[in-house]
Image (cartoon, grey):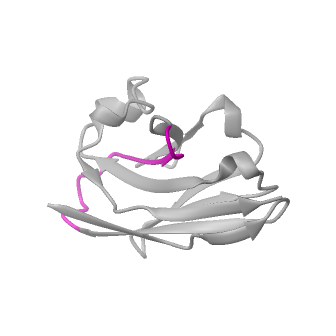
Amino acid sequence: QVQLVESGGGSVQAGGSVRLSCTISGYTYSIYCMAWFRQAPGKEREWVAAVDSHGDTQYADSVKGRFNISVDNAKNTLYLQIDSLKPEDTAMYYCAVTLSLRVCAGGRAGDPFEYRFWGQGTQVTVSS
């Protein structure tokens, strides 16, 4: 089993920055793809970014240039840096991981059904 705990959310002014963290514990040796998703009220869960075990990253077109996903393997922590925050970035942000090789490498990083393990989410609220 793998446990994920997000932190770092909060209320931020538009134009500001926030760094979300996802601490990963449990059976971490076979994690091949890690991702961030977000979900705004009344909307479907949206994929934001993913990183594989080699450090290769992928981003949704809507966040390229403002979001940066990274992982610190020594700390078993996944990060999401968000810059130039906009009110439309307001959402609950979730981290997710999969033990499957095919997700990041096979073009499926954006499919939430490919991820077996999820955190409880951390709220980011951006005010204008």
Count of marks, rendered view: 0
Q: Quadrant of residue 29?
A: bottom left
In the image, residue 113 lies in the stretch drawn in magenta: no
Where is residue 105 shown, x and y percent of the image?
Answer: 40, 29
Q: Which residues are magenta?
A: 26-42
Of residues 18 and 92, which is closer to you in this image?
92
**Which image quarter holds the C terminus?**
bottom right
x 34%, y 63%: residue: 120
Instruction: Please indicate whether residue 19 sits to the left or right of residue 105 in the image.
Output: right
Where is residue 47 shown, x and y percent of the image?
Answer: 50, 38
User: Does 59 appear above or below 38?
Assistant: above
Instruction: Please indicate whether residue 13 sits to the left or right of residue 32 in the image.
Output: right
In the image, residue 36 lies in the stretch drawn in magenta: yes
Of residues 101 and 122, which is closer to you in this image?
122
x 74%, y 51%: residue: 87
Of residues 96 and 26, which is closer to you in this image?
96
Q: Quadrant of residue 82?
A: bottom right
x 45%, y 34%: residue: 44
Where is residue 51 shown, x and y percent of the image?
Answer: 49, 46
Q: Residue furthest left?
A: 1
Q: Residue furthest front?
A: 42
**Which image quarter holds the N terminus?**
bottom left
x 30%, y 29%: residue: 102
Where is residue 104 shown, x and y percent of the image?
Answer: 41, 34
User: Does 72 appear above or below 37?
Assistant: below
Instruction: Please indicate whether residue 104 sits to the left or right of residue 8 in the image.
Output: left
Of residues 63 and 53, which is closer to you in this image?
63
